[in-house]
Image (spheres, helix red, strand yellow):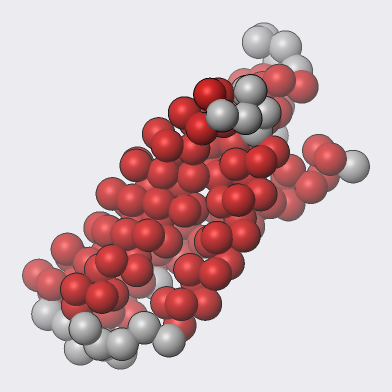
Amino acid sequence: MERLGNAIGYGCMIGISNTFMLWIPSYLMNVKGFTSLKMGFLASAPFVGAVIGNTLGGWMSDRMFDKRRKPTMMIGAFCTIVMMAALIYAPNNAAYLGLLLLLAGLLLGFGYAGFSAYPMGLTTKDAYPIASAL
């Protein structure tokens, strides 16, 4: 059952990251009215945050949670829900919106690494690439 939960959680995280890639740029230009230059900076904020979040989440998972992946997965998932709700009501202020997008990416990345690292502990080194691809 926990494997099914991991798969569902991973699918949801992929959906959110695809939203960042596909929807955020057009939303910033069409709804918020930002220029393409400002939109480019703002749309990259979640990915900058994700790099930081992946690193921080992996470090915390290894050091603070004794190499357990579930705590960072759960923290990242819950905080991502909160950040997505905050983004819905974000004002037109570019600095505030950029900070929210950066934090949303950071918190998404915080748990994201655990969703791919967790199955590695359940399978062999030879079977993981095939299982991950499926």
In x, y percent, where is residue 81? 58, 67
Q: Where is the C terminus found, in terms of image quarters?
A: top right
Q: In which quarter of the image is residue 34?
A: bottom left
In x, y percent, where is residue 40? 18, 65
Total marks drawn? 0
Of the pair 73 and 117, the residue shown nearer to us: 73
In x, y percent, where is residue 121? 71, 20
Relative to 113, 100 lies left or right: left
Farthest residue in the front direction?
Answer: 64
Relative to 48, 133 lies left or right: right
Question: Which residue is at a point 36% across and 83% down the rendered structure image?
Answer: 90
In x, y percent, where is residue 62? 55, 24
Q: In this view, does 124 lie above or below 129?
A: above
Of the pair 93 and 6, the residue shown nearer to us: 93
Relative to 133, 83 lies left or right: left
Relative to 71, 5 lies left or right: right
Residue 5: tell me if it is visible: yes
Q: Is residue 60 above or below residue 51?
A: above
Q: Where is the N terminus found, in terms of image quarters?
A: top right
Q: In which quarter of the image is residue 26?
A: bottom left
Question: Which residue is at a point 65% across and 10% down the rendered structure image?
Answer: 125
Question: Which residue is at a point 53% across and 61% down the rendered structure image?
Answer: 80
Residue 130: tell me if it is visible: no
Q: Is residue 79 above or below residue 4?
A: below
